[in-house]
Amino acid sequence: MNFTTCNLFLAFVFALMTSVYAHPVSVTARDVYVPPILTPKAGDSWVIGDVRSVTWNVSSPPAQITNPVGQILLRKGNLTQNVTLAEGFNILDGNASFVVPSVTPDDDYRVVLFGDSGNFSPVFSILASTTS
């Protein structure tokens, strides 16, 4: 195959012509939604095996939420644990209930609410169950 100046020129013209037919894609503006967590509150105590709820304020959501599917994870100290408390709910529900998992009782837990982003609750305690 012999590439000449004419062939290169024609390839260049063809590339320019095809770029004219490219259509811009409209992008819908979406907002990151970080609803404030209402419960658990600082100093609250949960007992392993009890049914508890995480609640958050949904009074002012943006018009377009990037990810409306929520997930709540447990965080201990500075590390988010591989413990899913609830998932698959609509972030605009404002609450999710679950059974407190069997974890090491301690006073440095938080929940992390994910939808668009992750936000942390205040620190609370998880206590051992008093029943066997």
Image (cartoon, grey):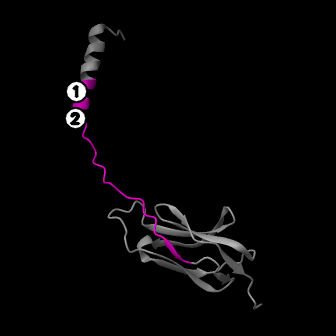
| C-alpha distance separating marks 2 and 1 | 7 Å
Residue at the image position 71 percent from the left and 78 percent from the top: 102
Question: What is the crowding at mark 1: few (fewer than 14 residues within 10 Å), some, or many (at least 20)?
Answer: few
Q: Are marks 2 and 1 in contact (CB under 8 Å)?
A: yes
Q: Amino acid at mark 1?
A: Met
Where 94 sits versus 14, above or below? below
Q: Which residues are magenta?
A: 15-39
Q: Residue furthest bottom?
A: 131
Where 7 sits versus 128, above or below? above
Q: Main secondary structure of the magenta part?
A: loop
Residue at the image position 42 percent from the left and 59 percent from the top: 32
Residue at the image position 75 percent from the left and 83 percent from the top: 128
Residue 24 in the magenta stretch? The answer is: yes
Residue 35 in the magenta stretch? The answer is: yes
List x then y, in percent, for residue 66: 40, 59
Depth check: give the residue in front, 75 or 57. Answer: 57
Where 6 sits versus 27, above or below? above
Name the residue beneath numbered marker 1.
17
Q: Amino acid at mark 2?
A: Tyr
In this picture, residue 35 sits left or right of residue 101: left
Any mark on residue 21, and which? 2
Give the quarter of the image for residue 16: top left
Of helix, strand and loop, which one carries label 1?
helix
Any mark on residue 127, and which? none
Depth check: give the residue in front, 41 or 105. Answer: 41
Of helix, strand and loop, which one carries label 2?
loop
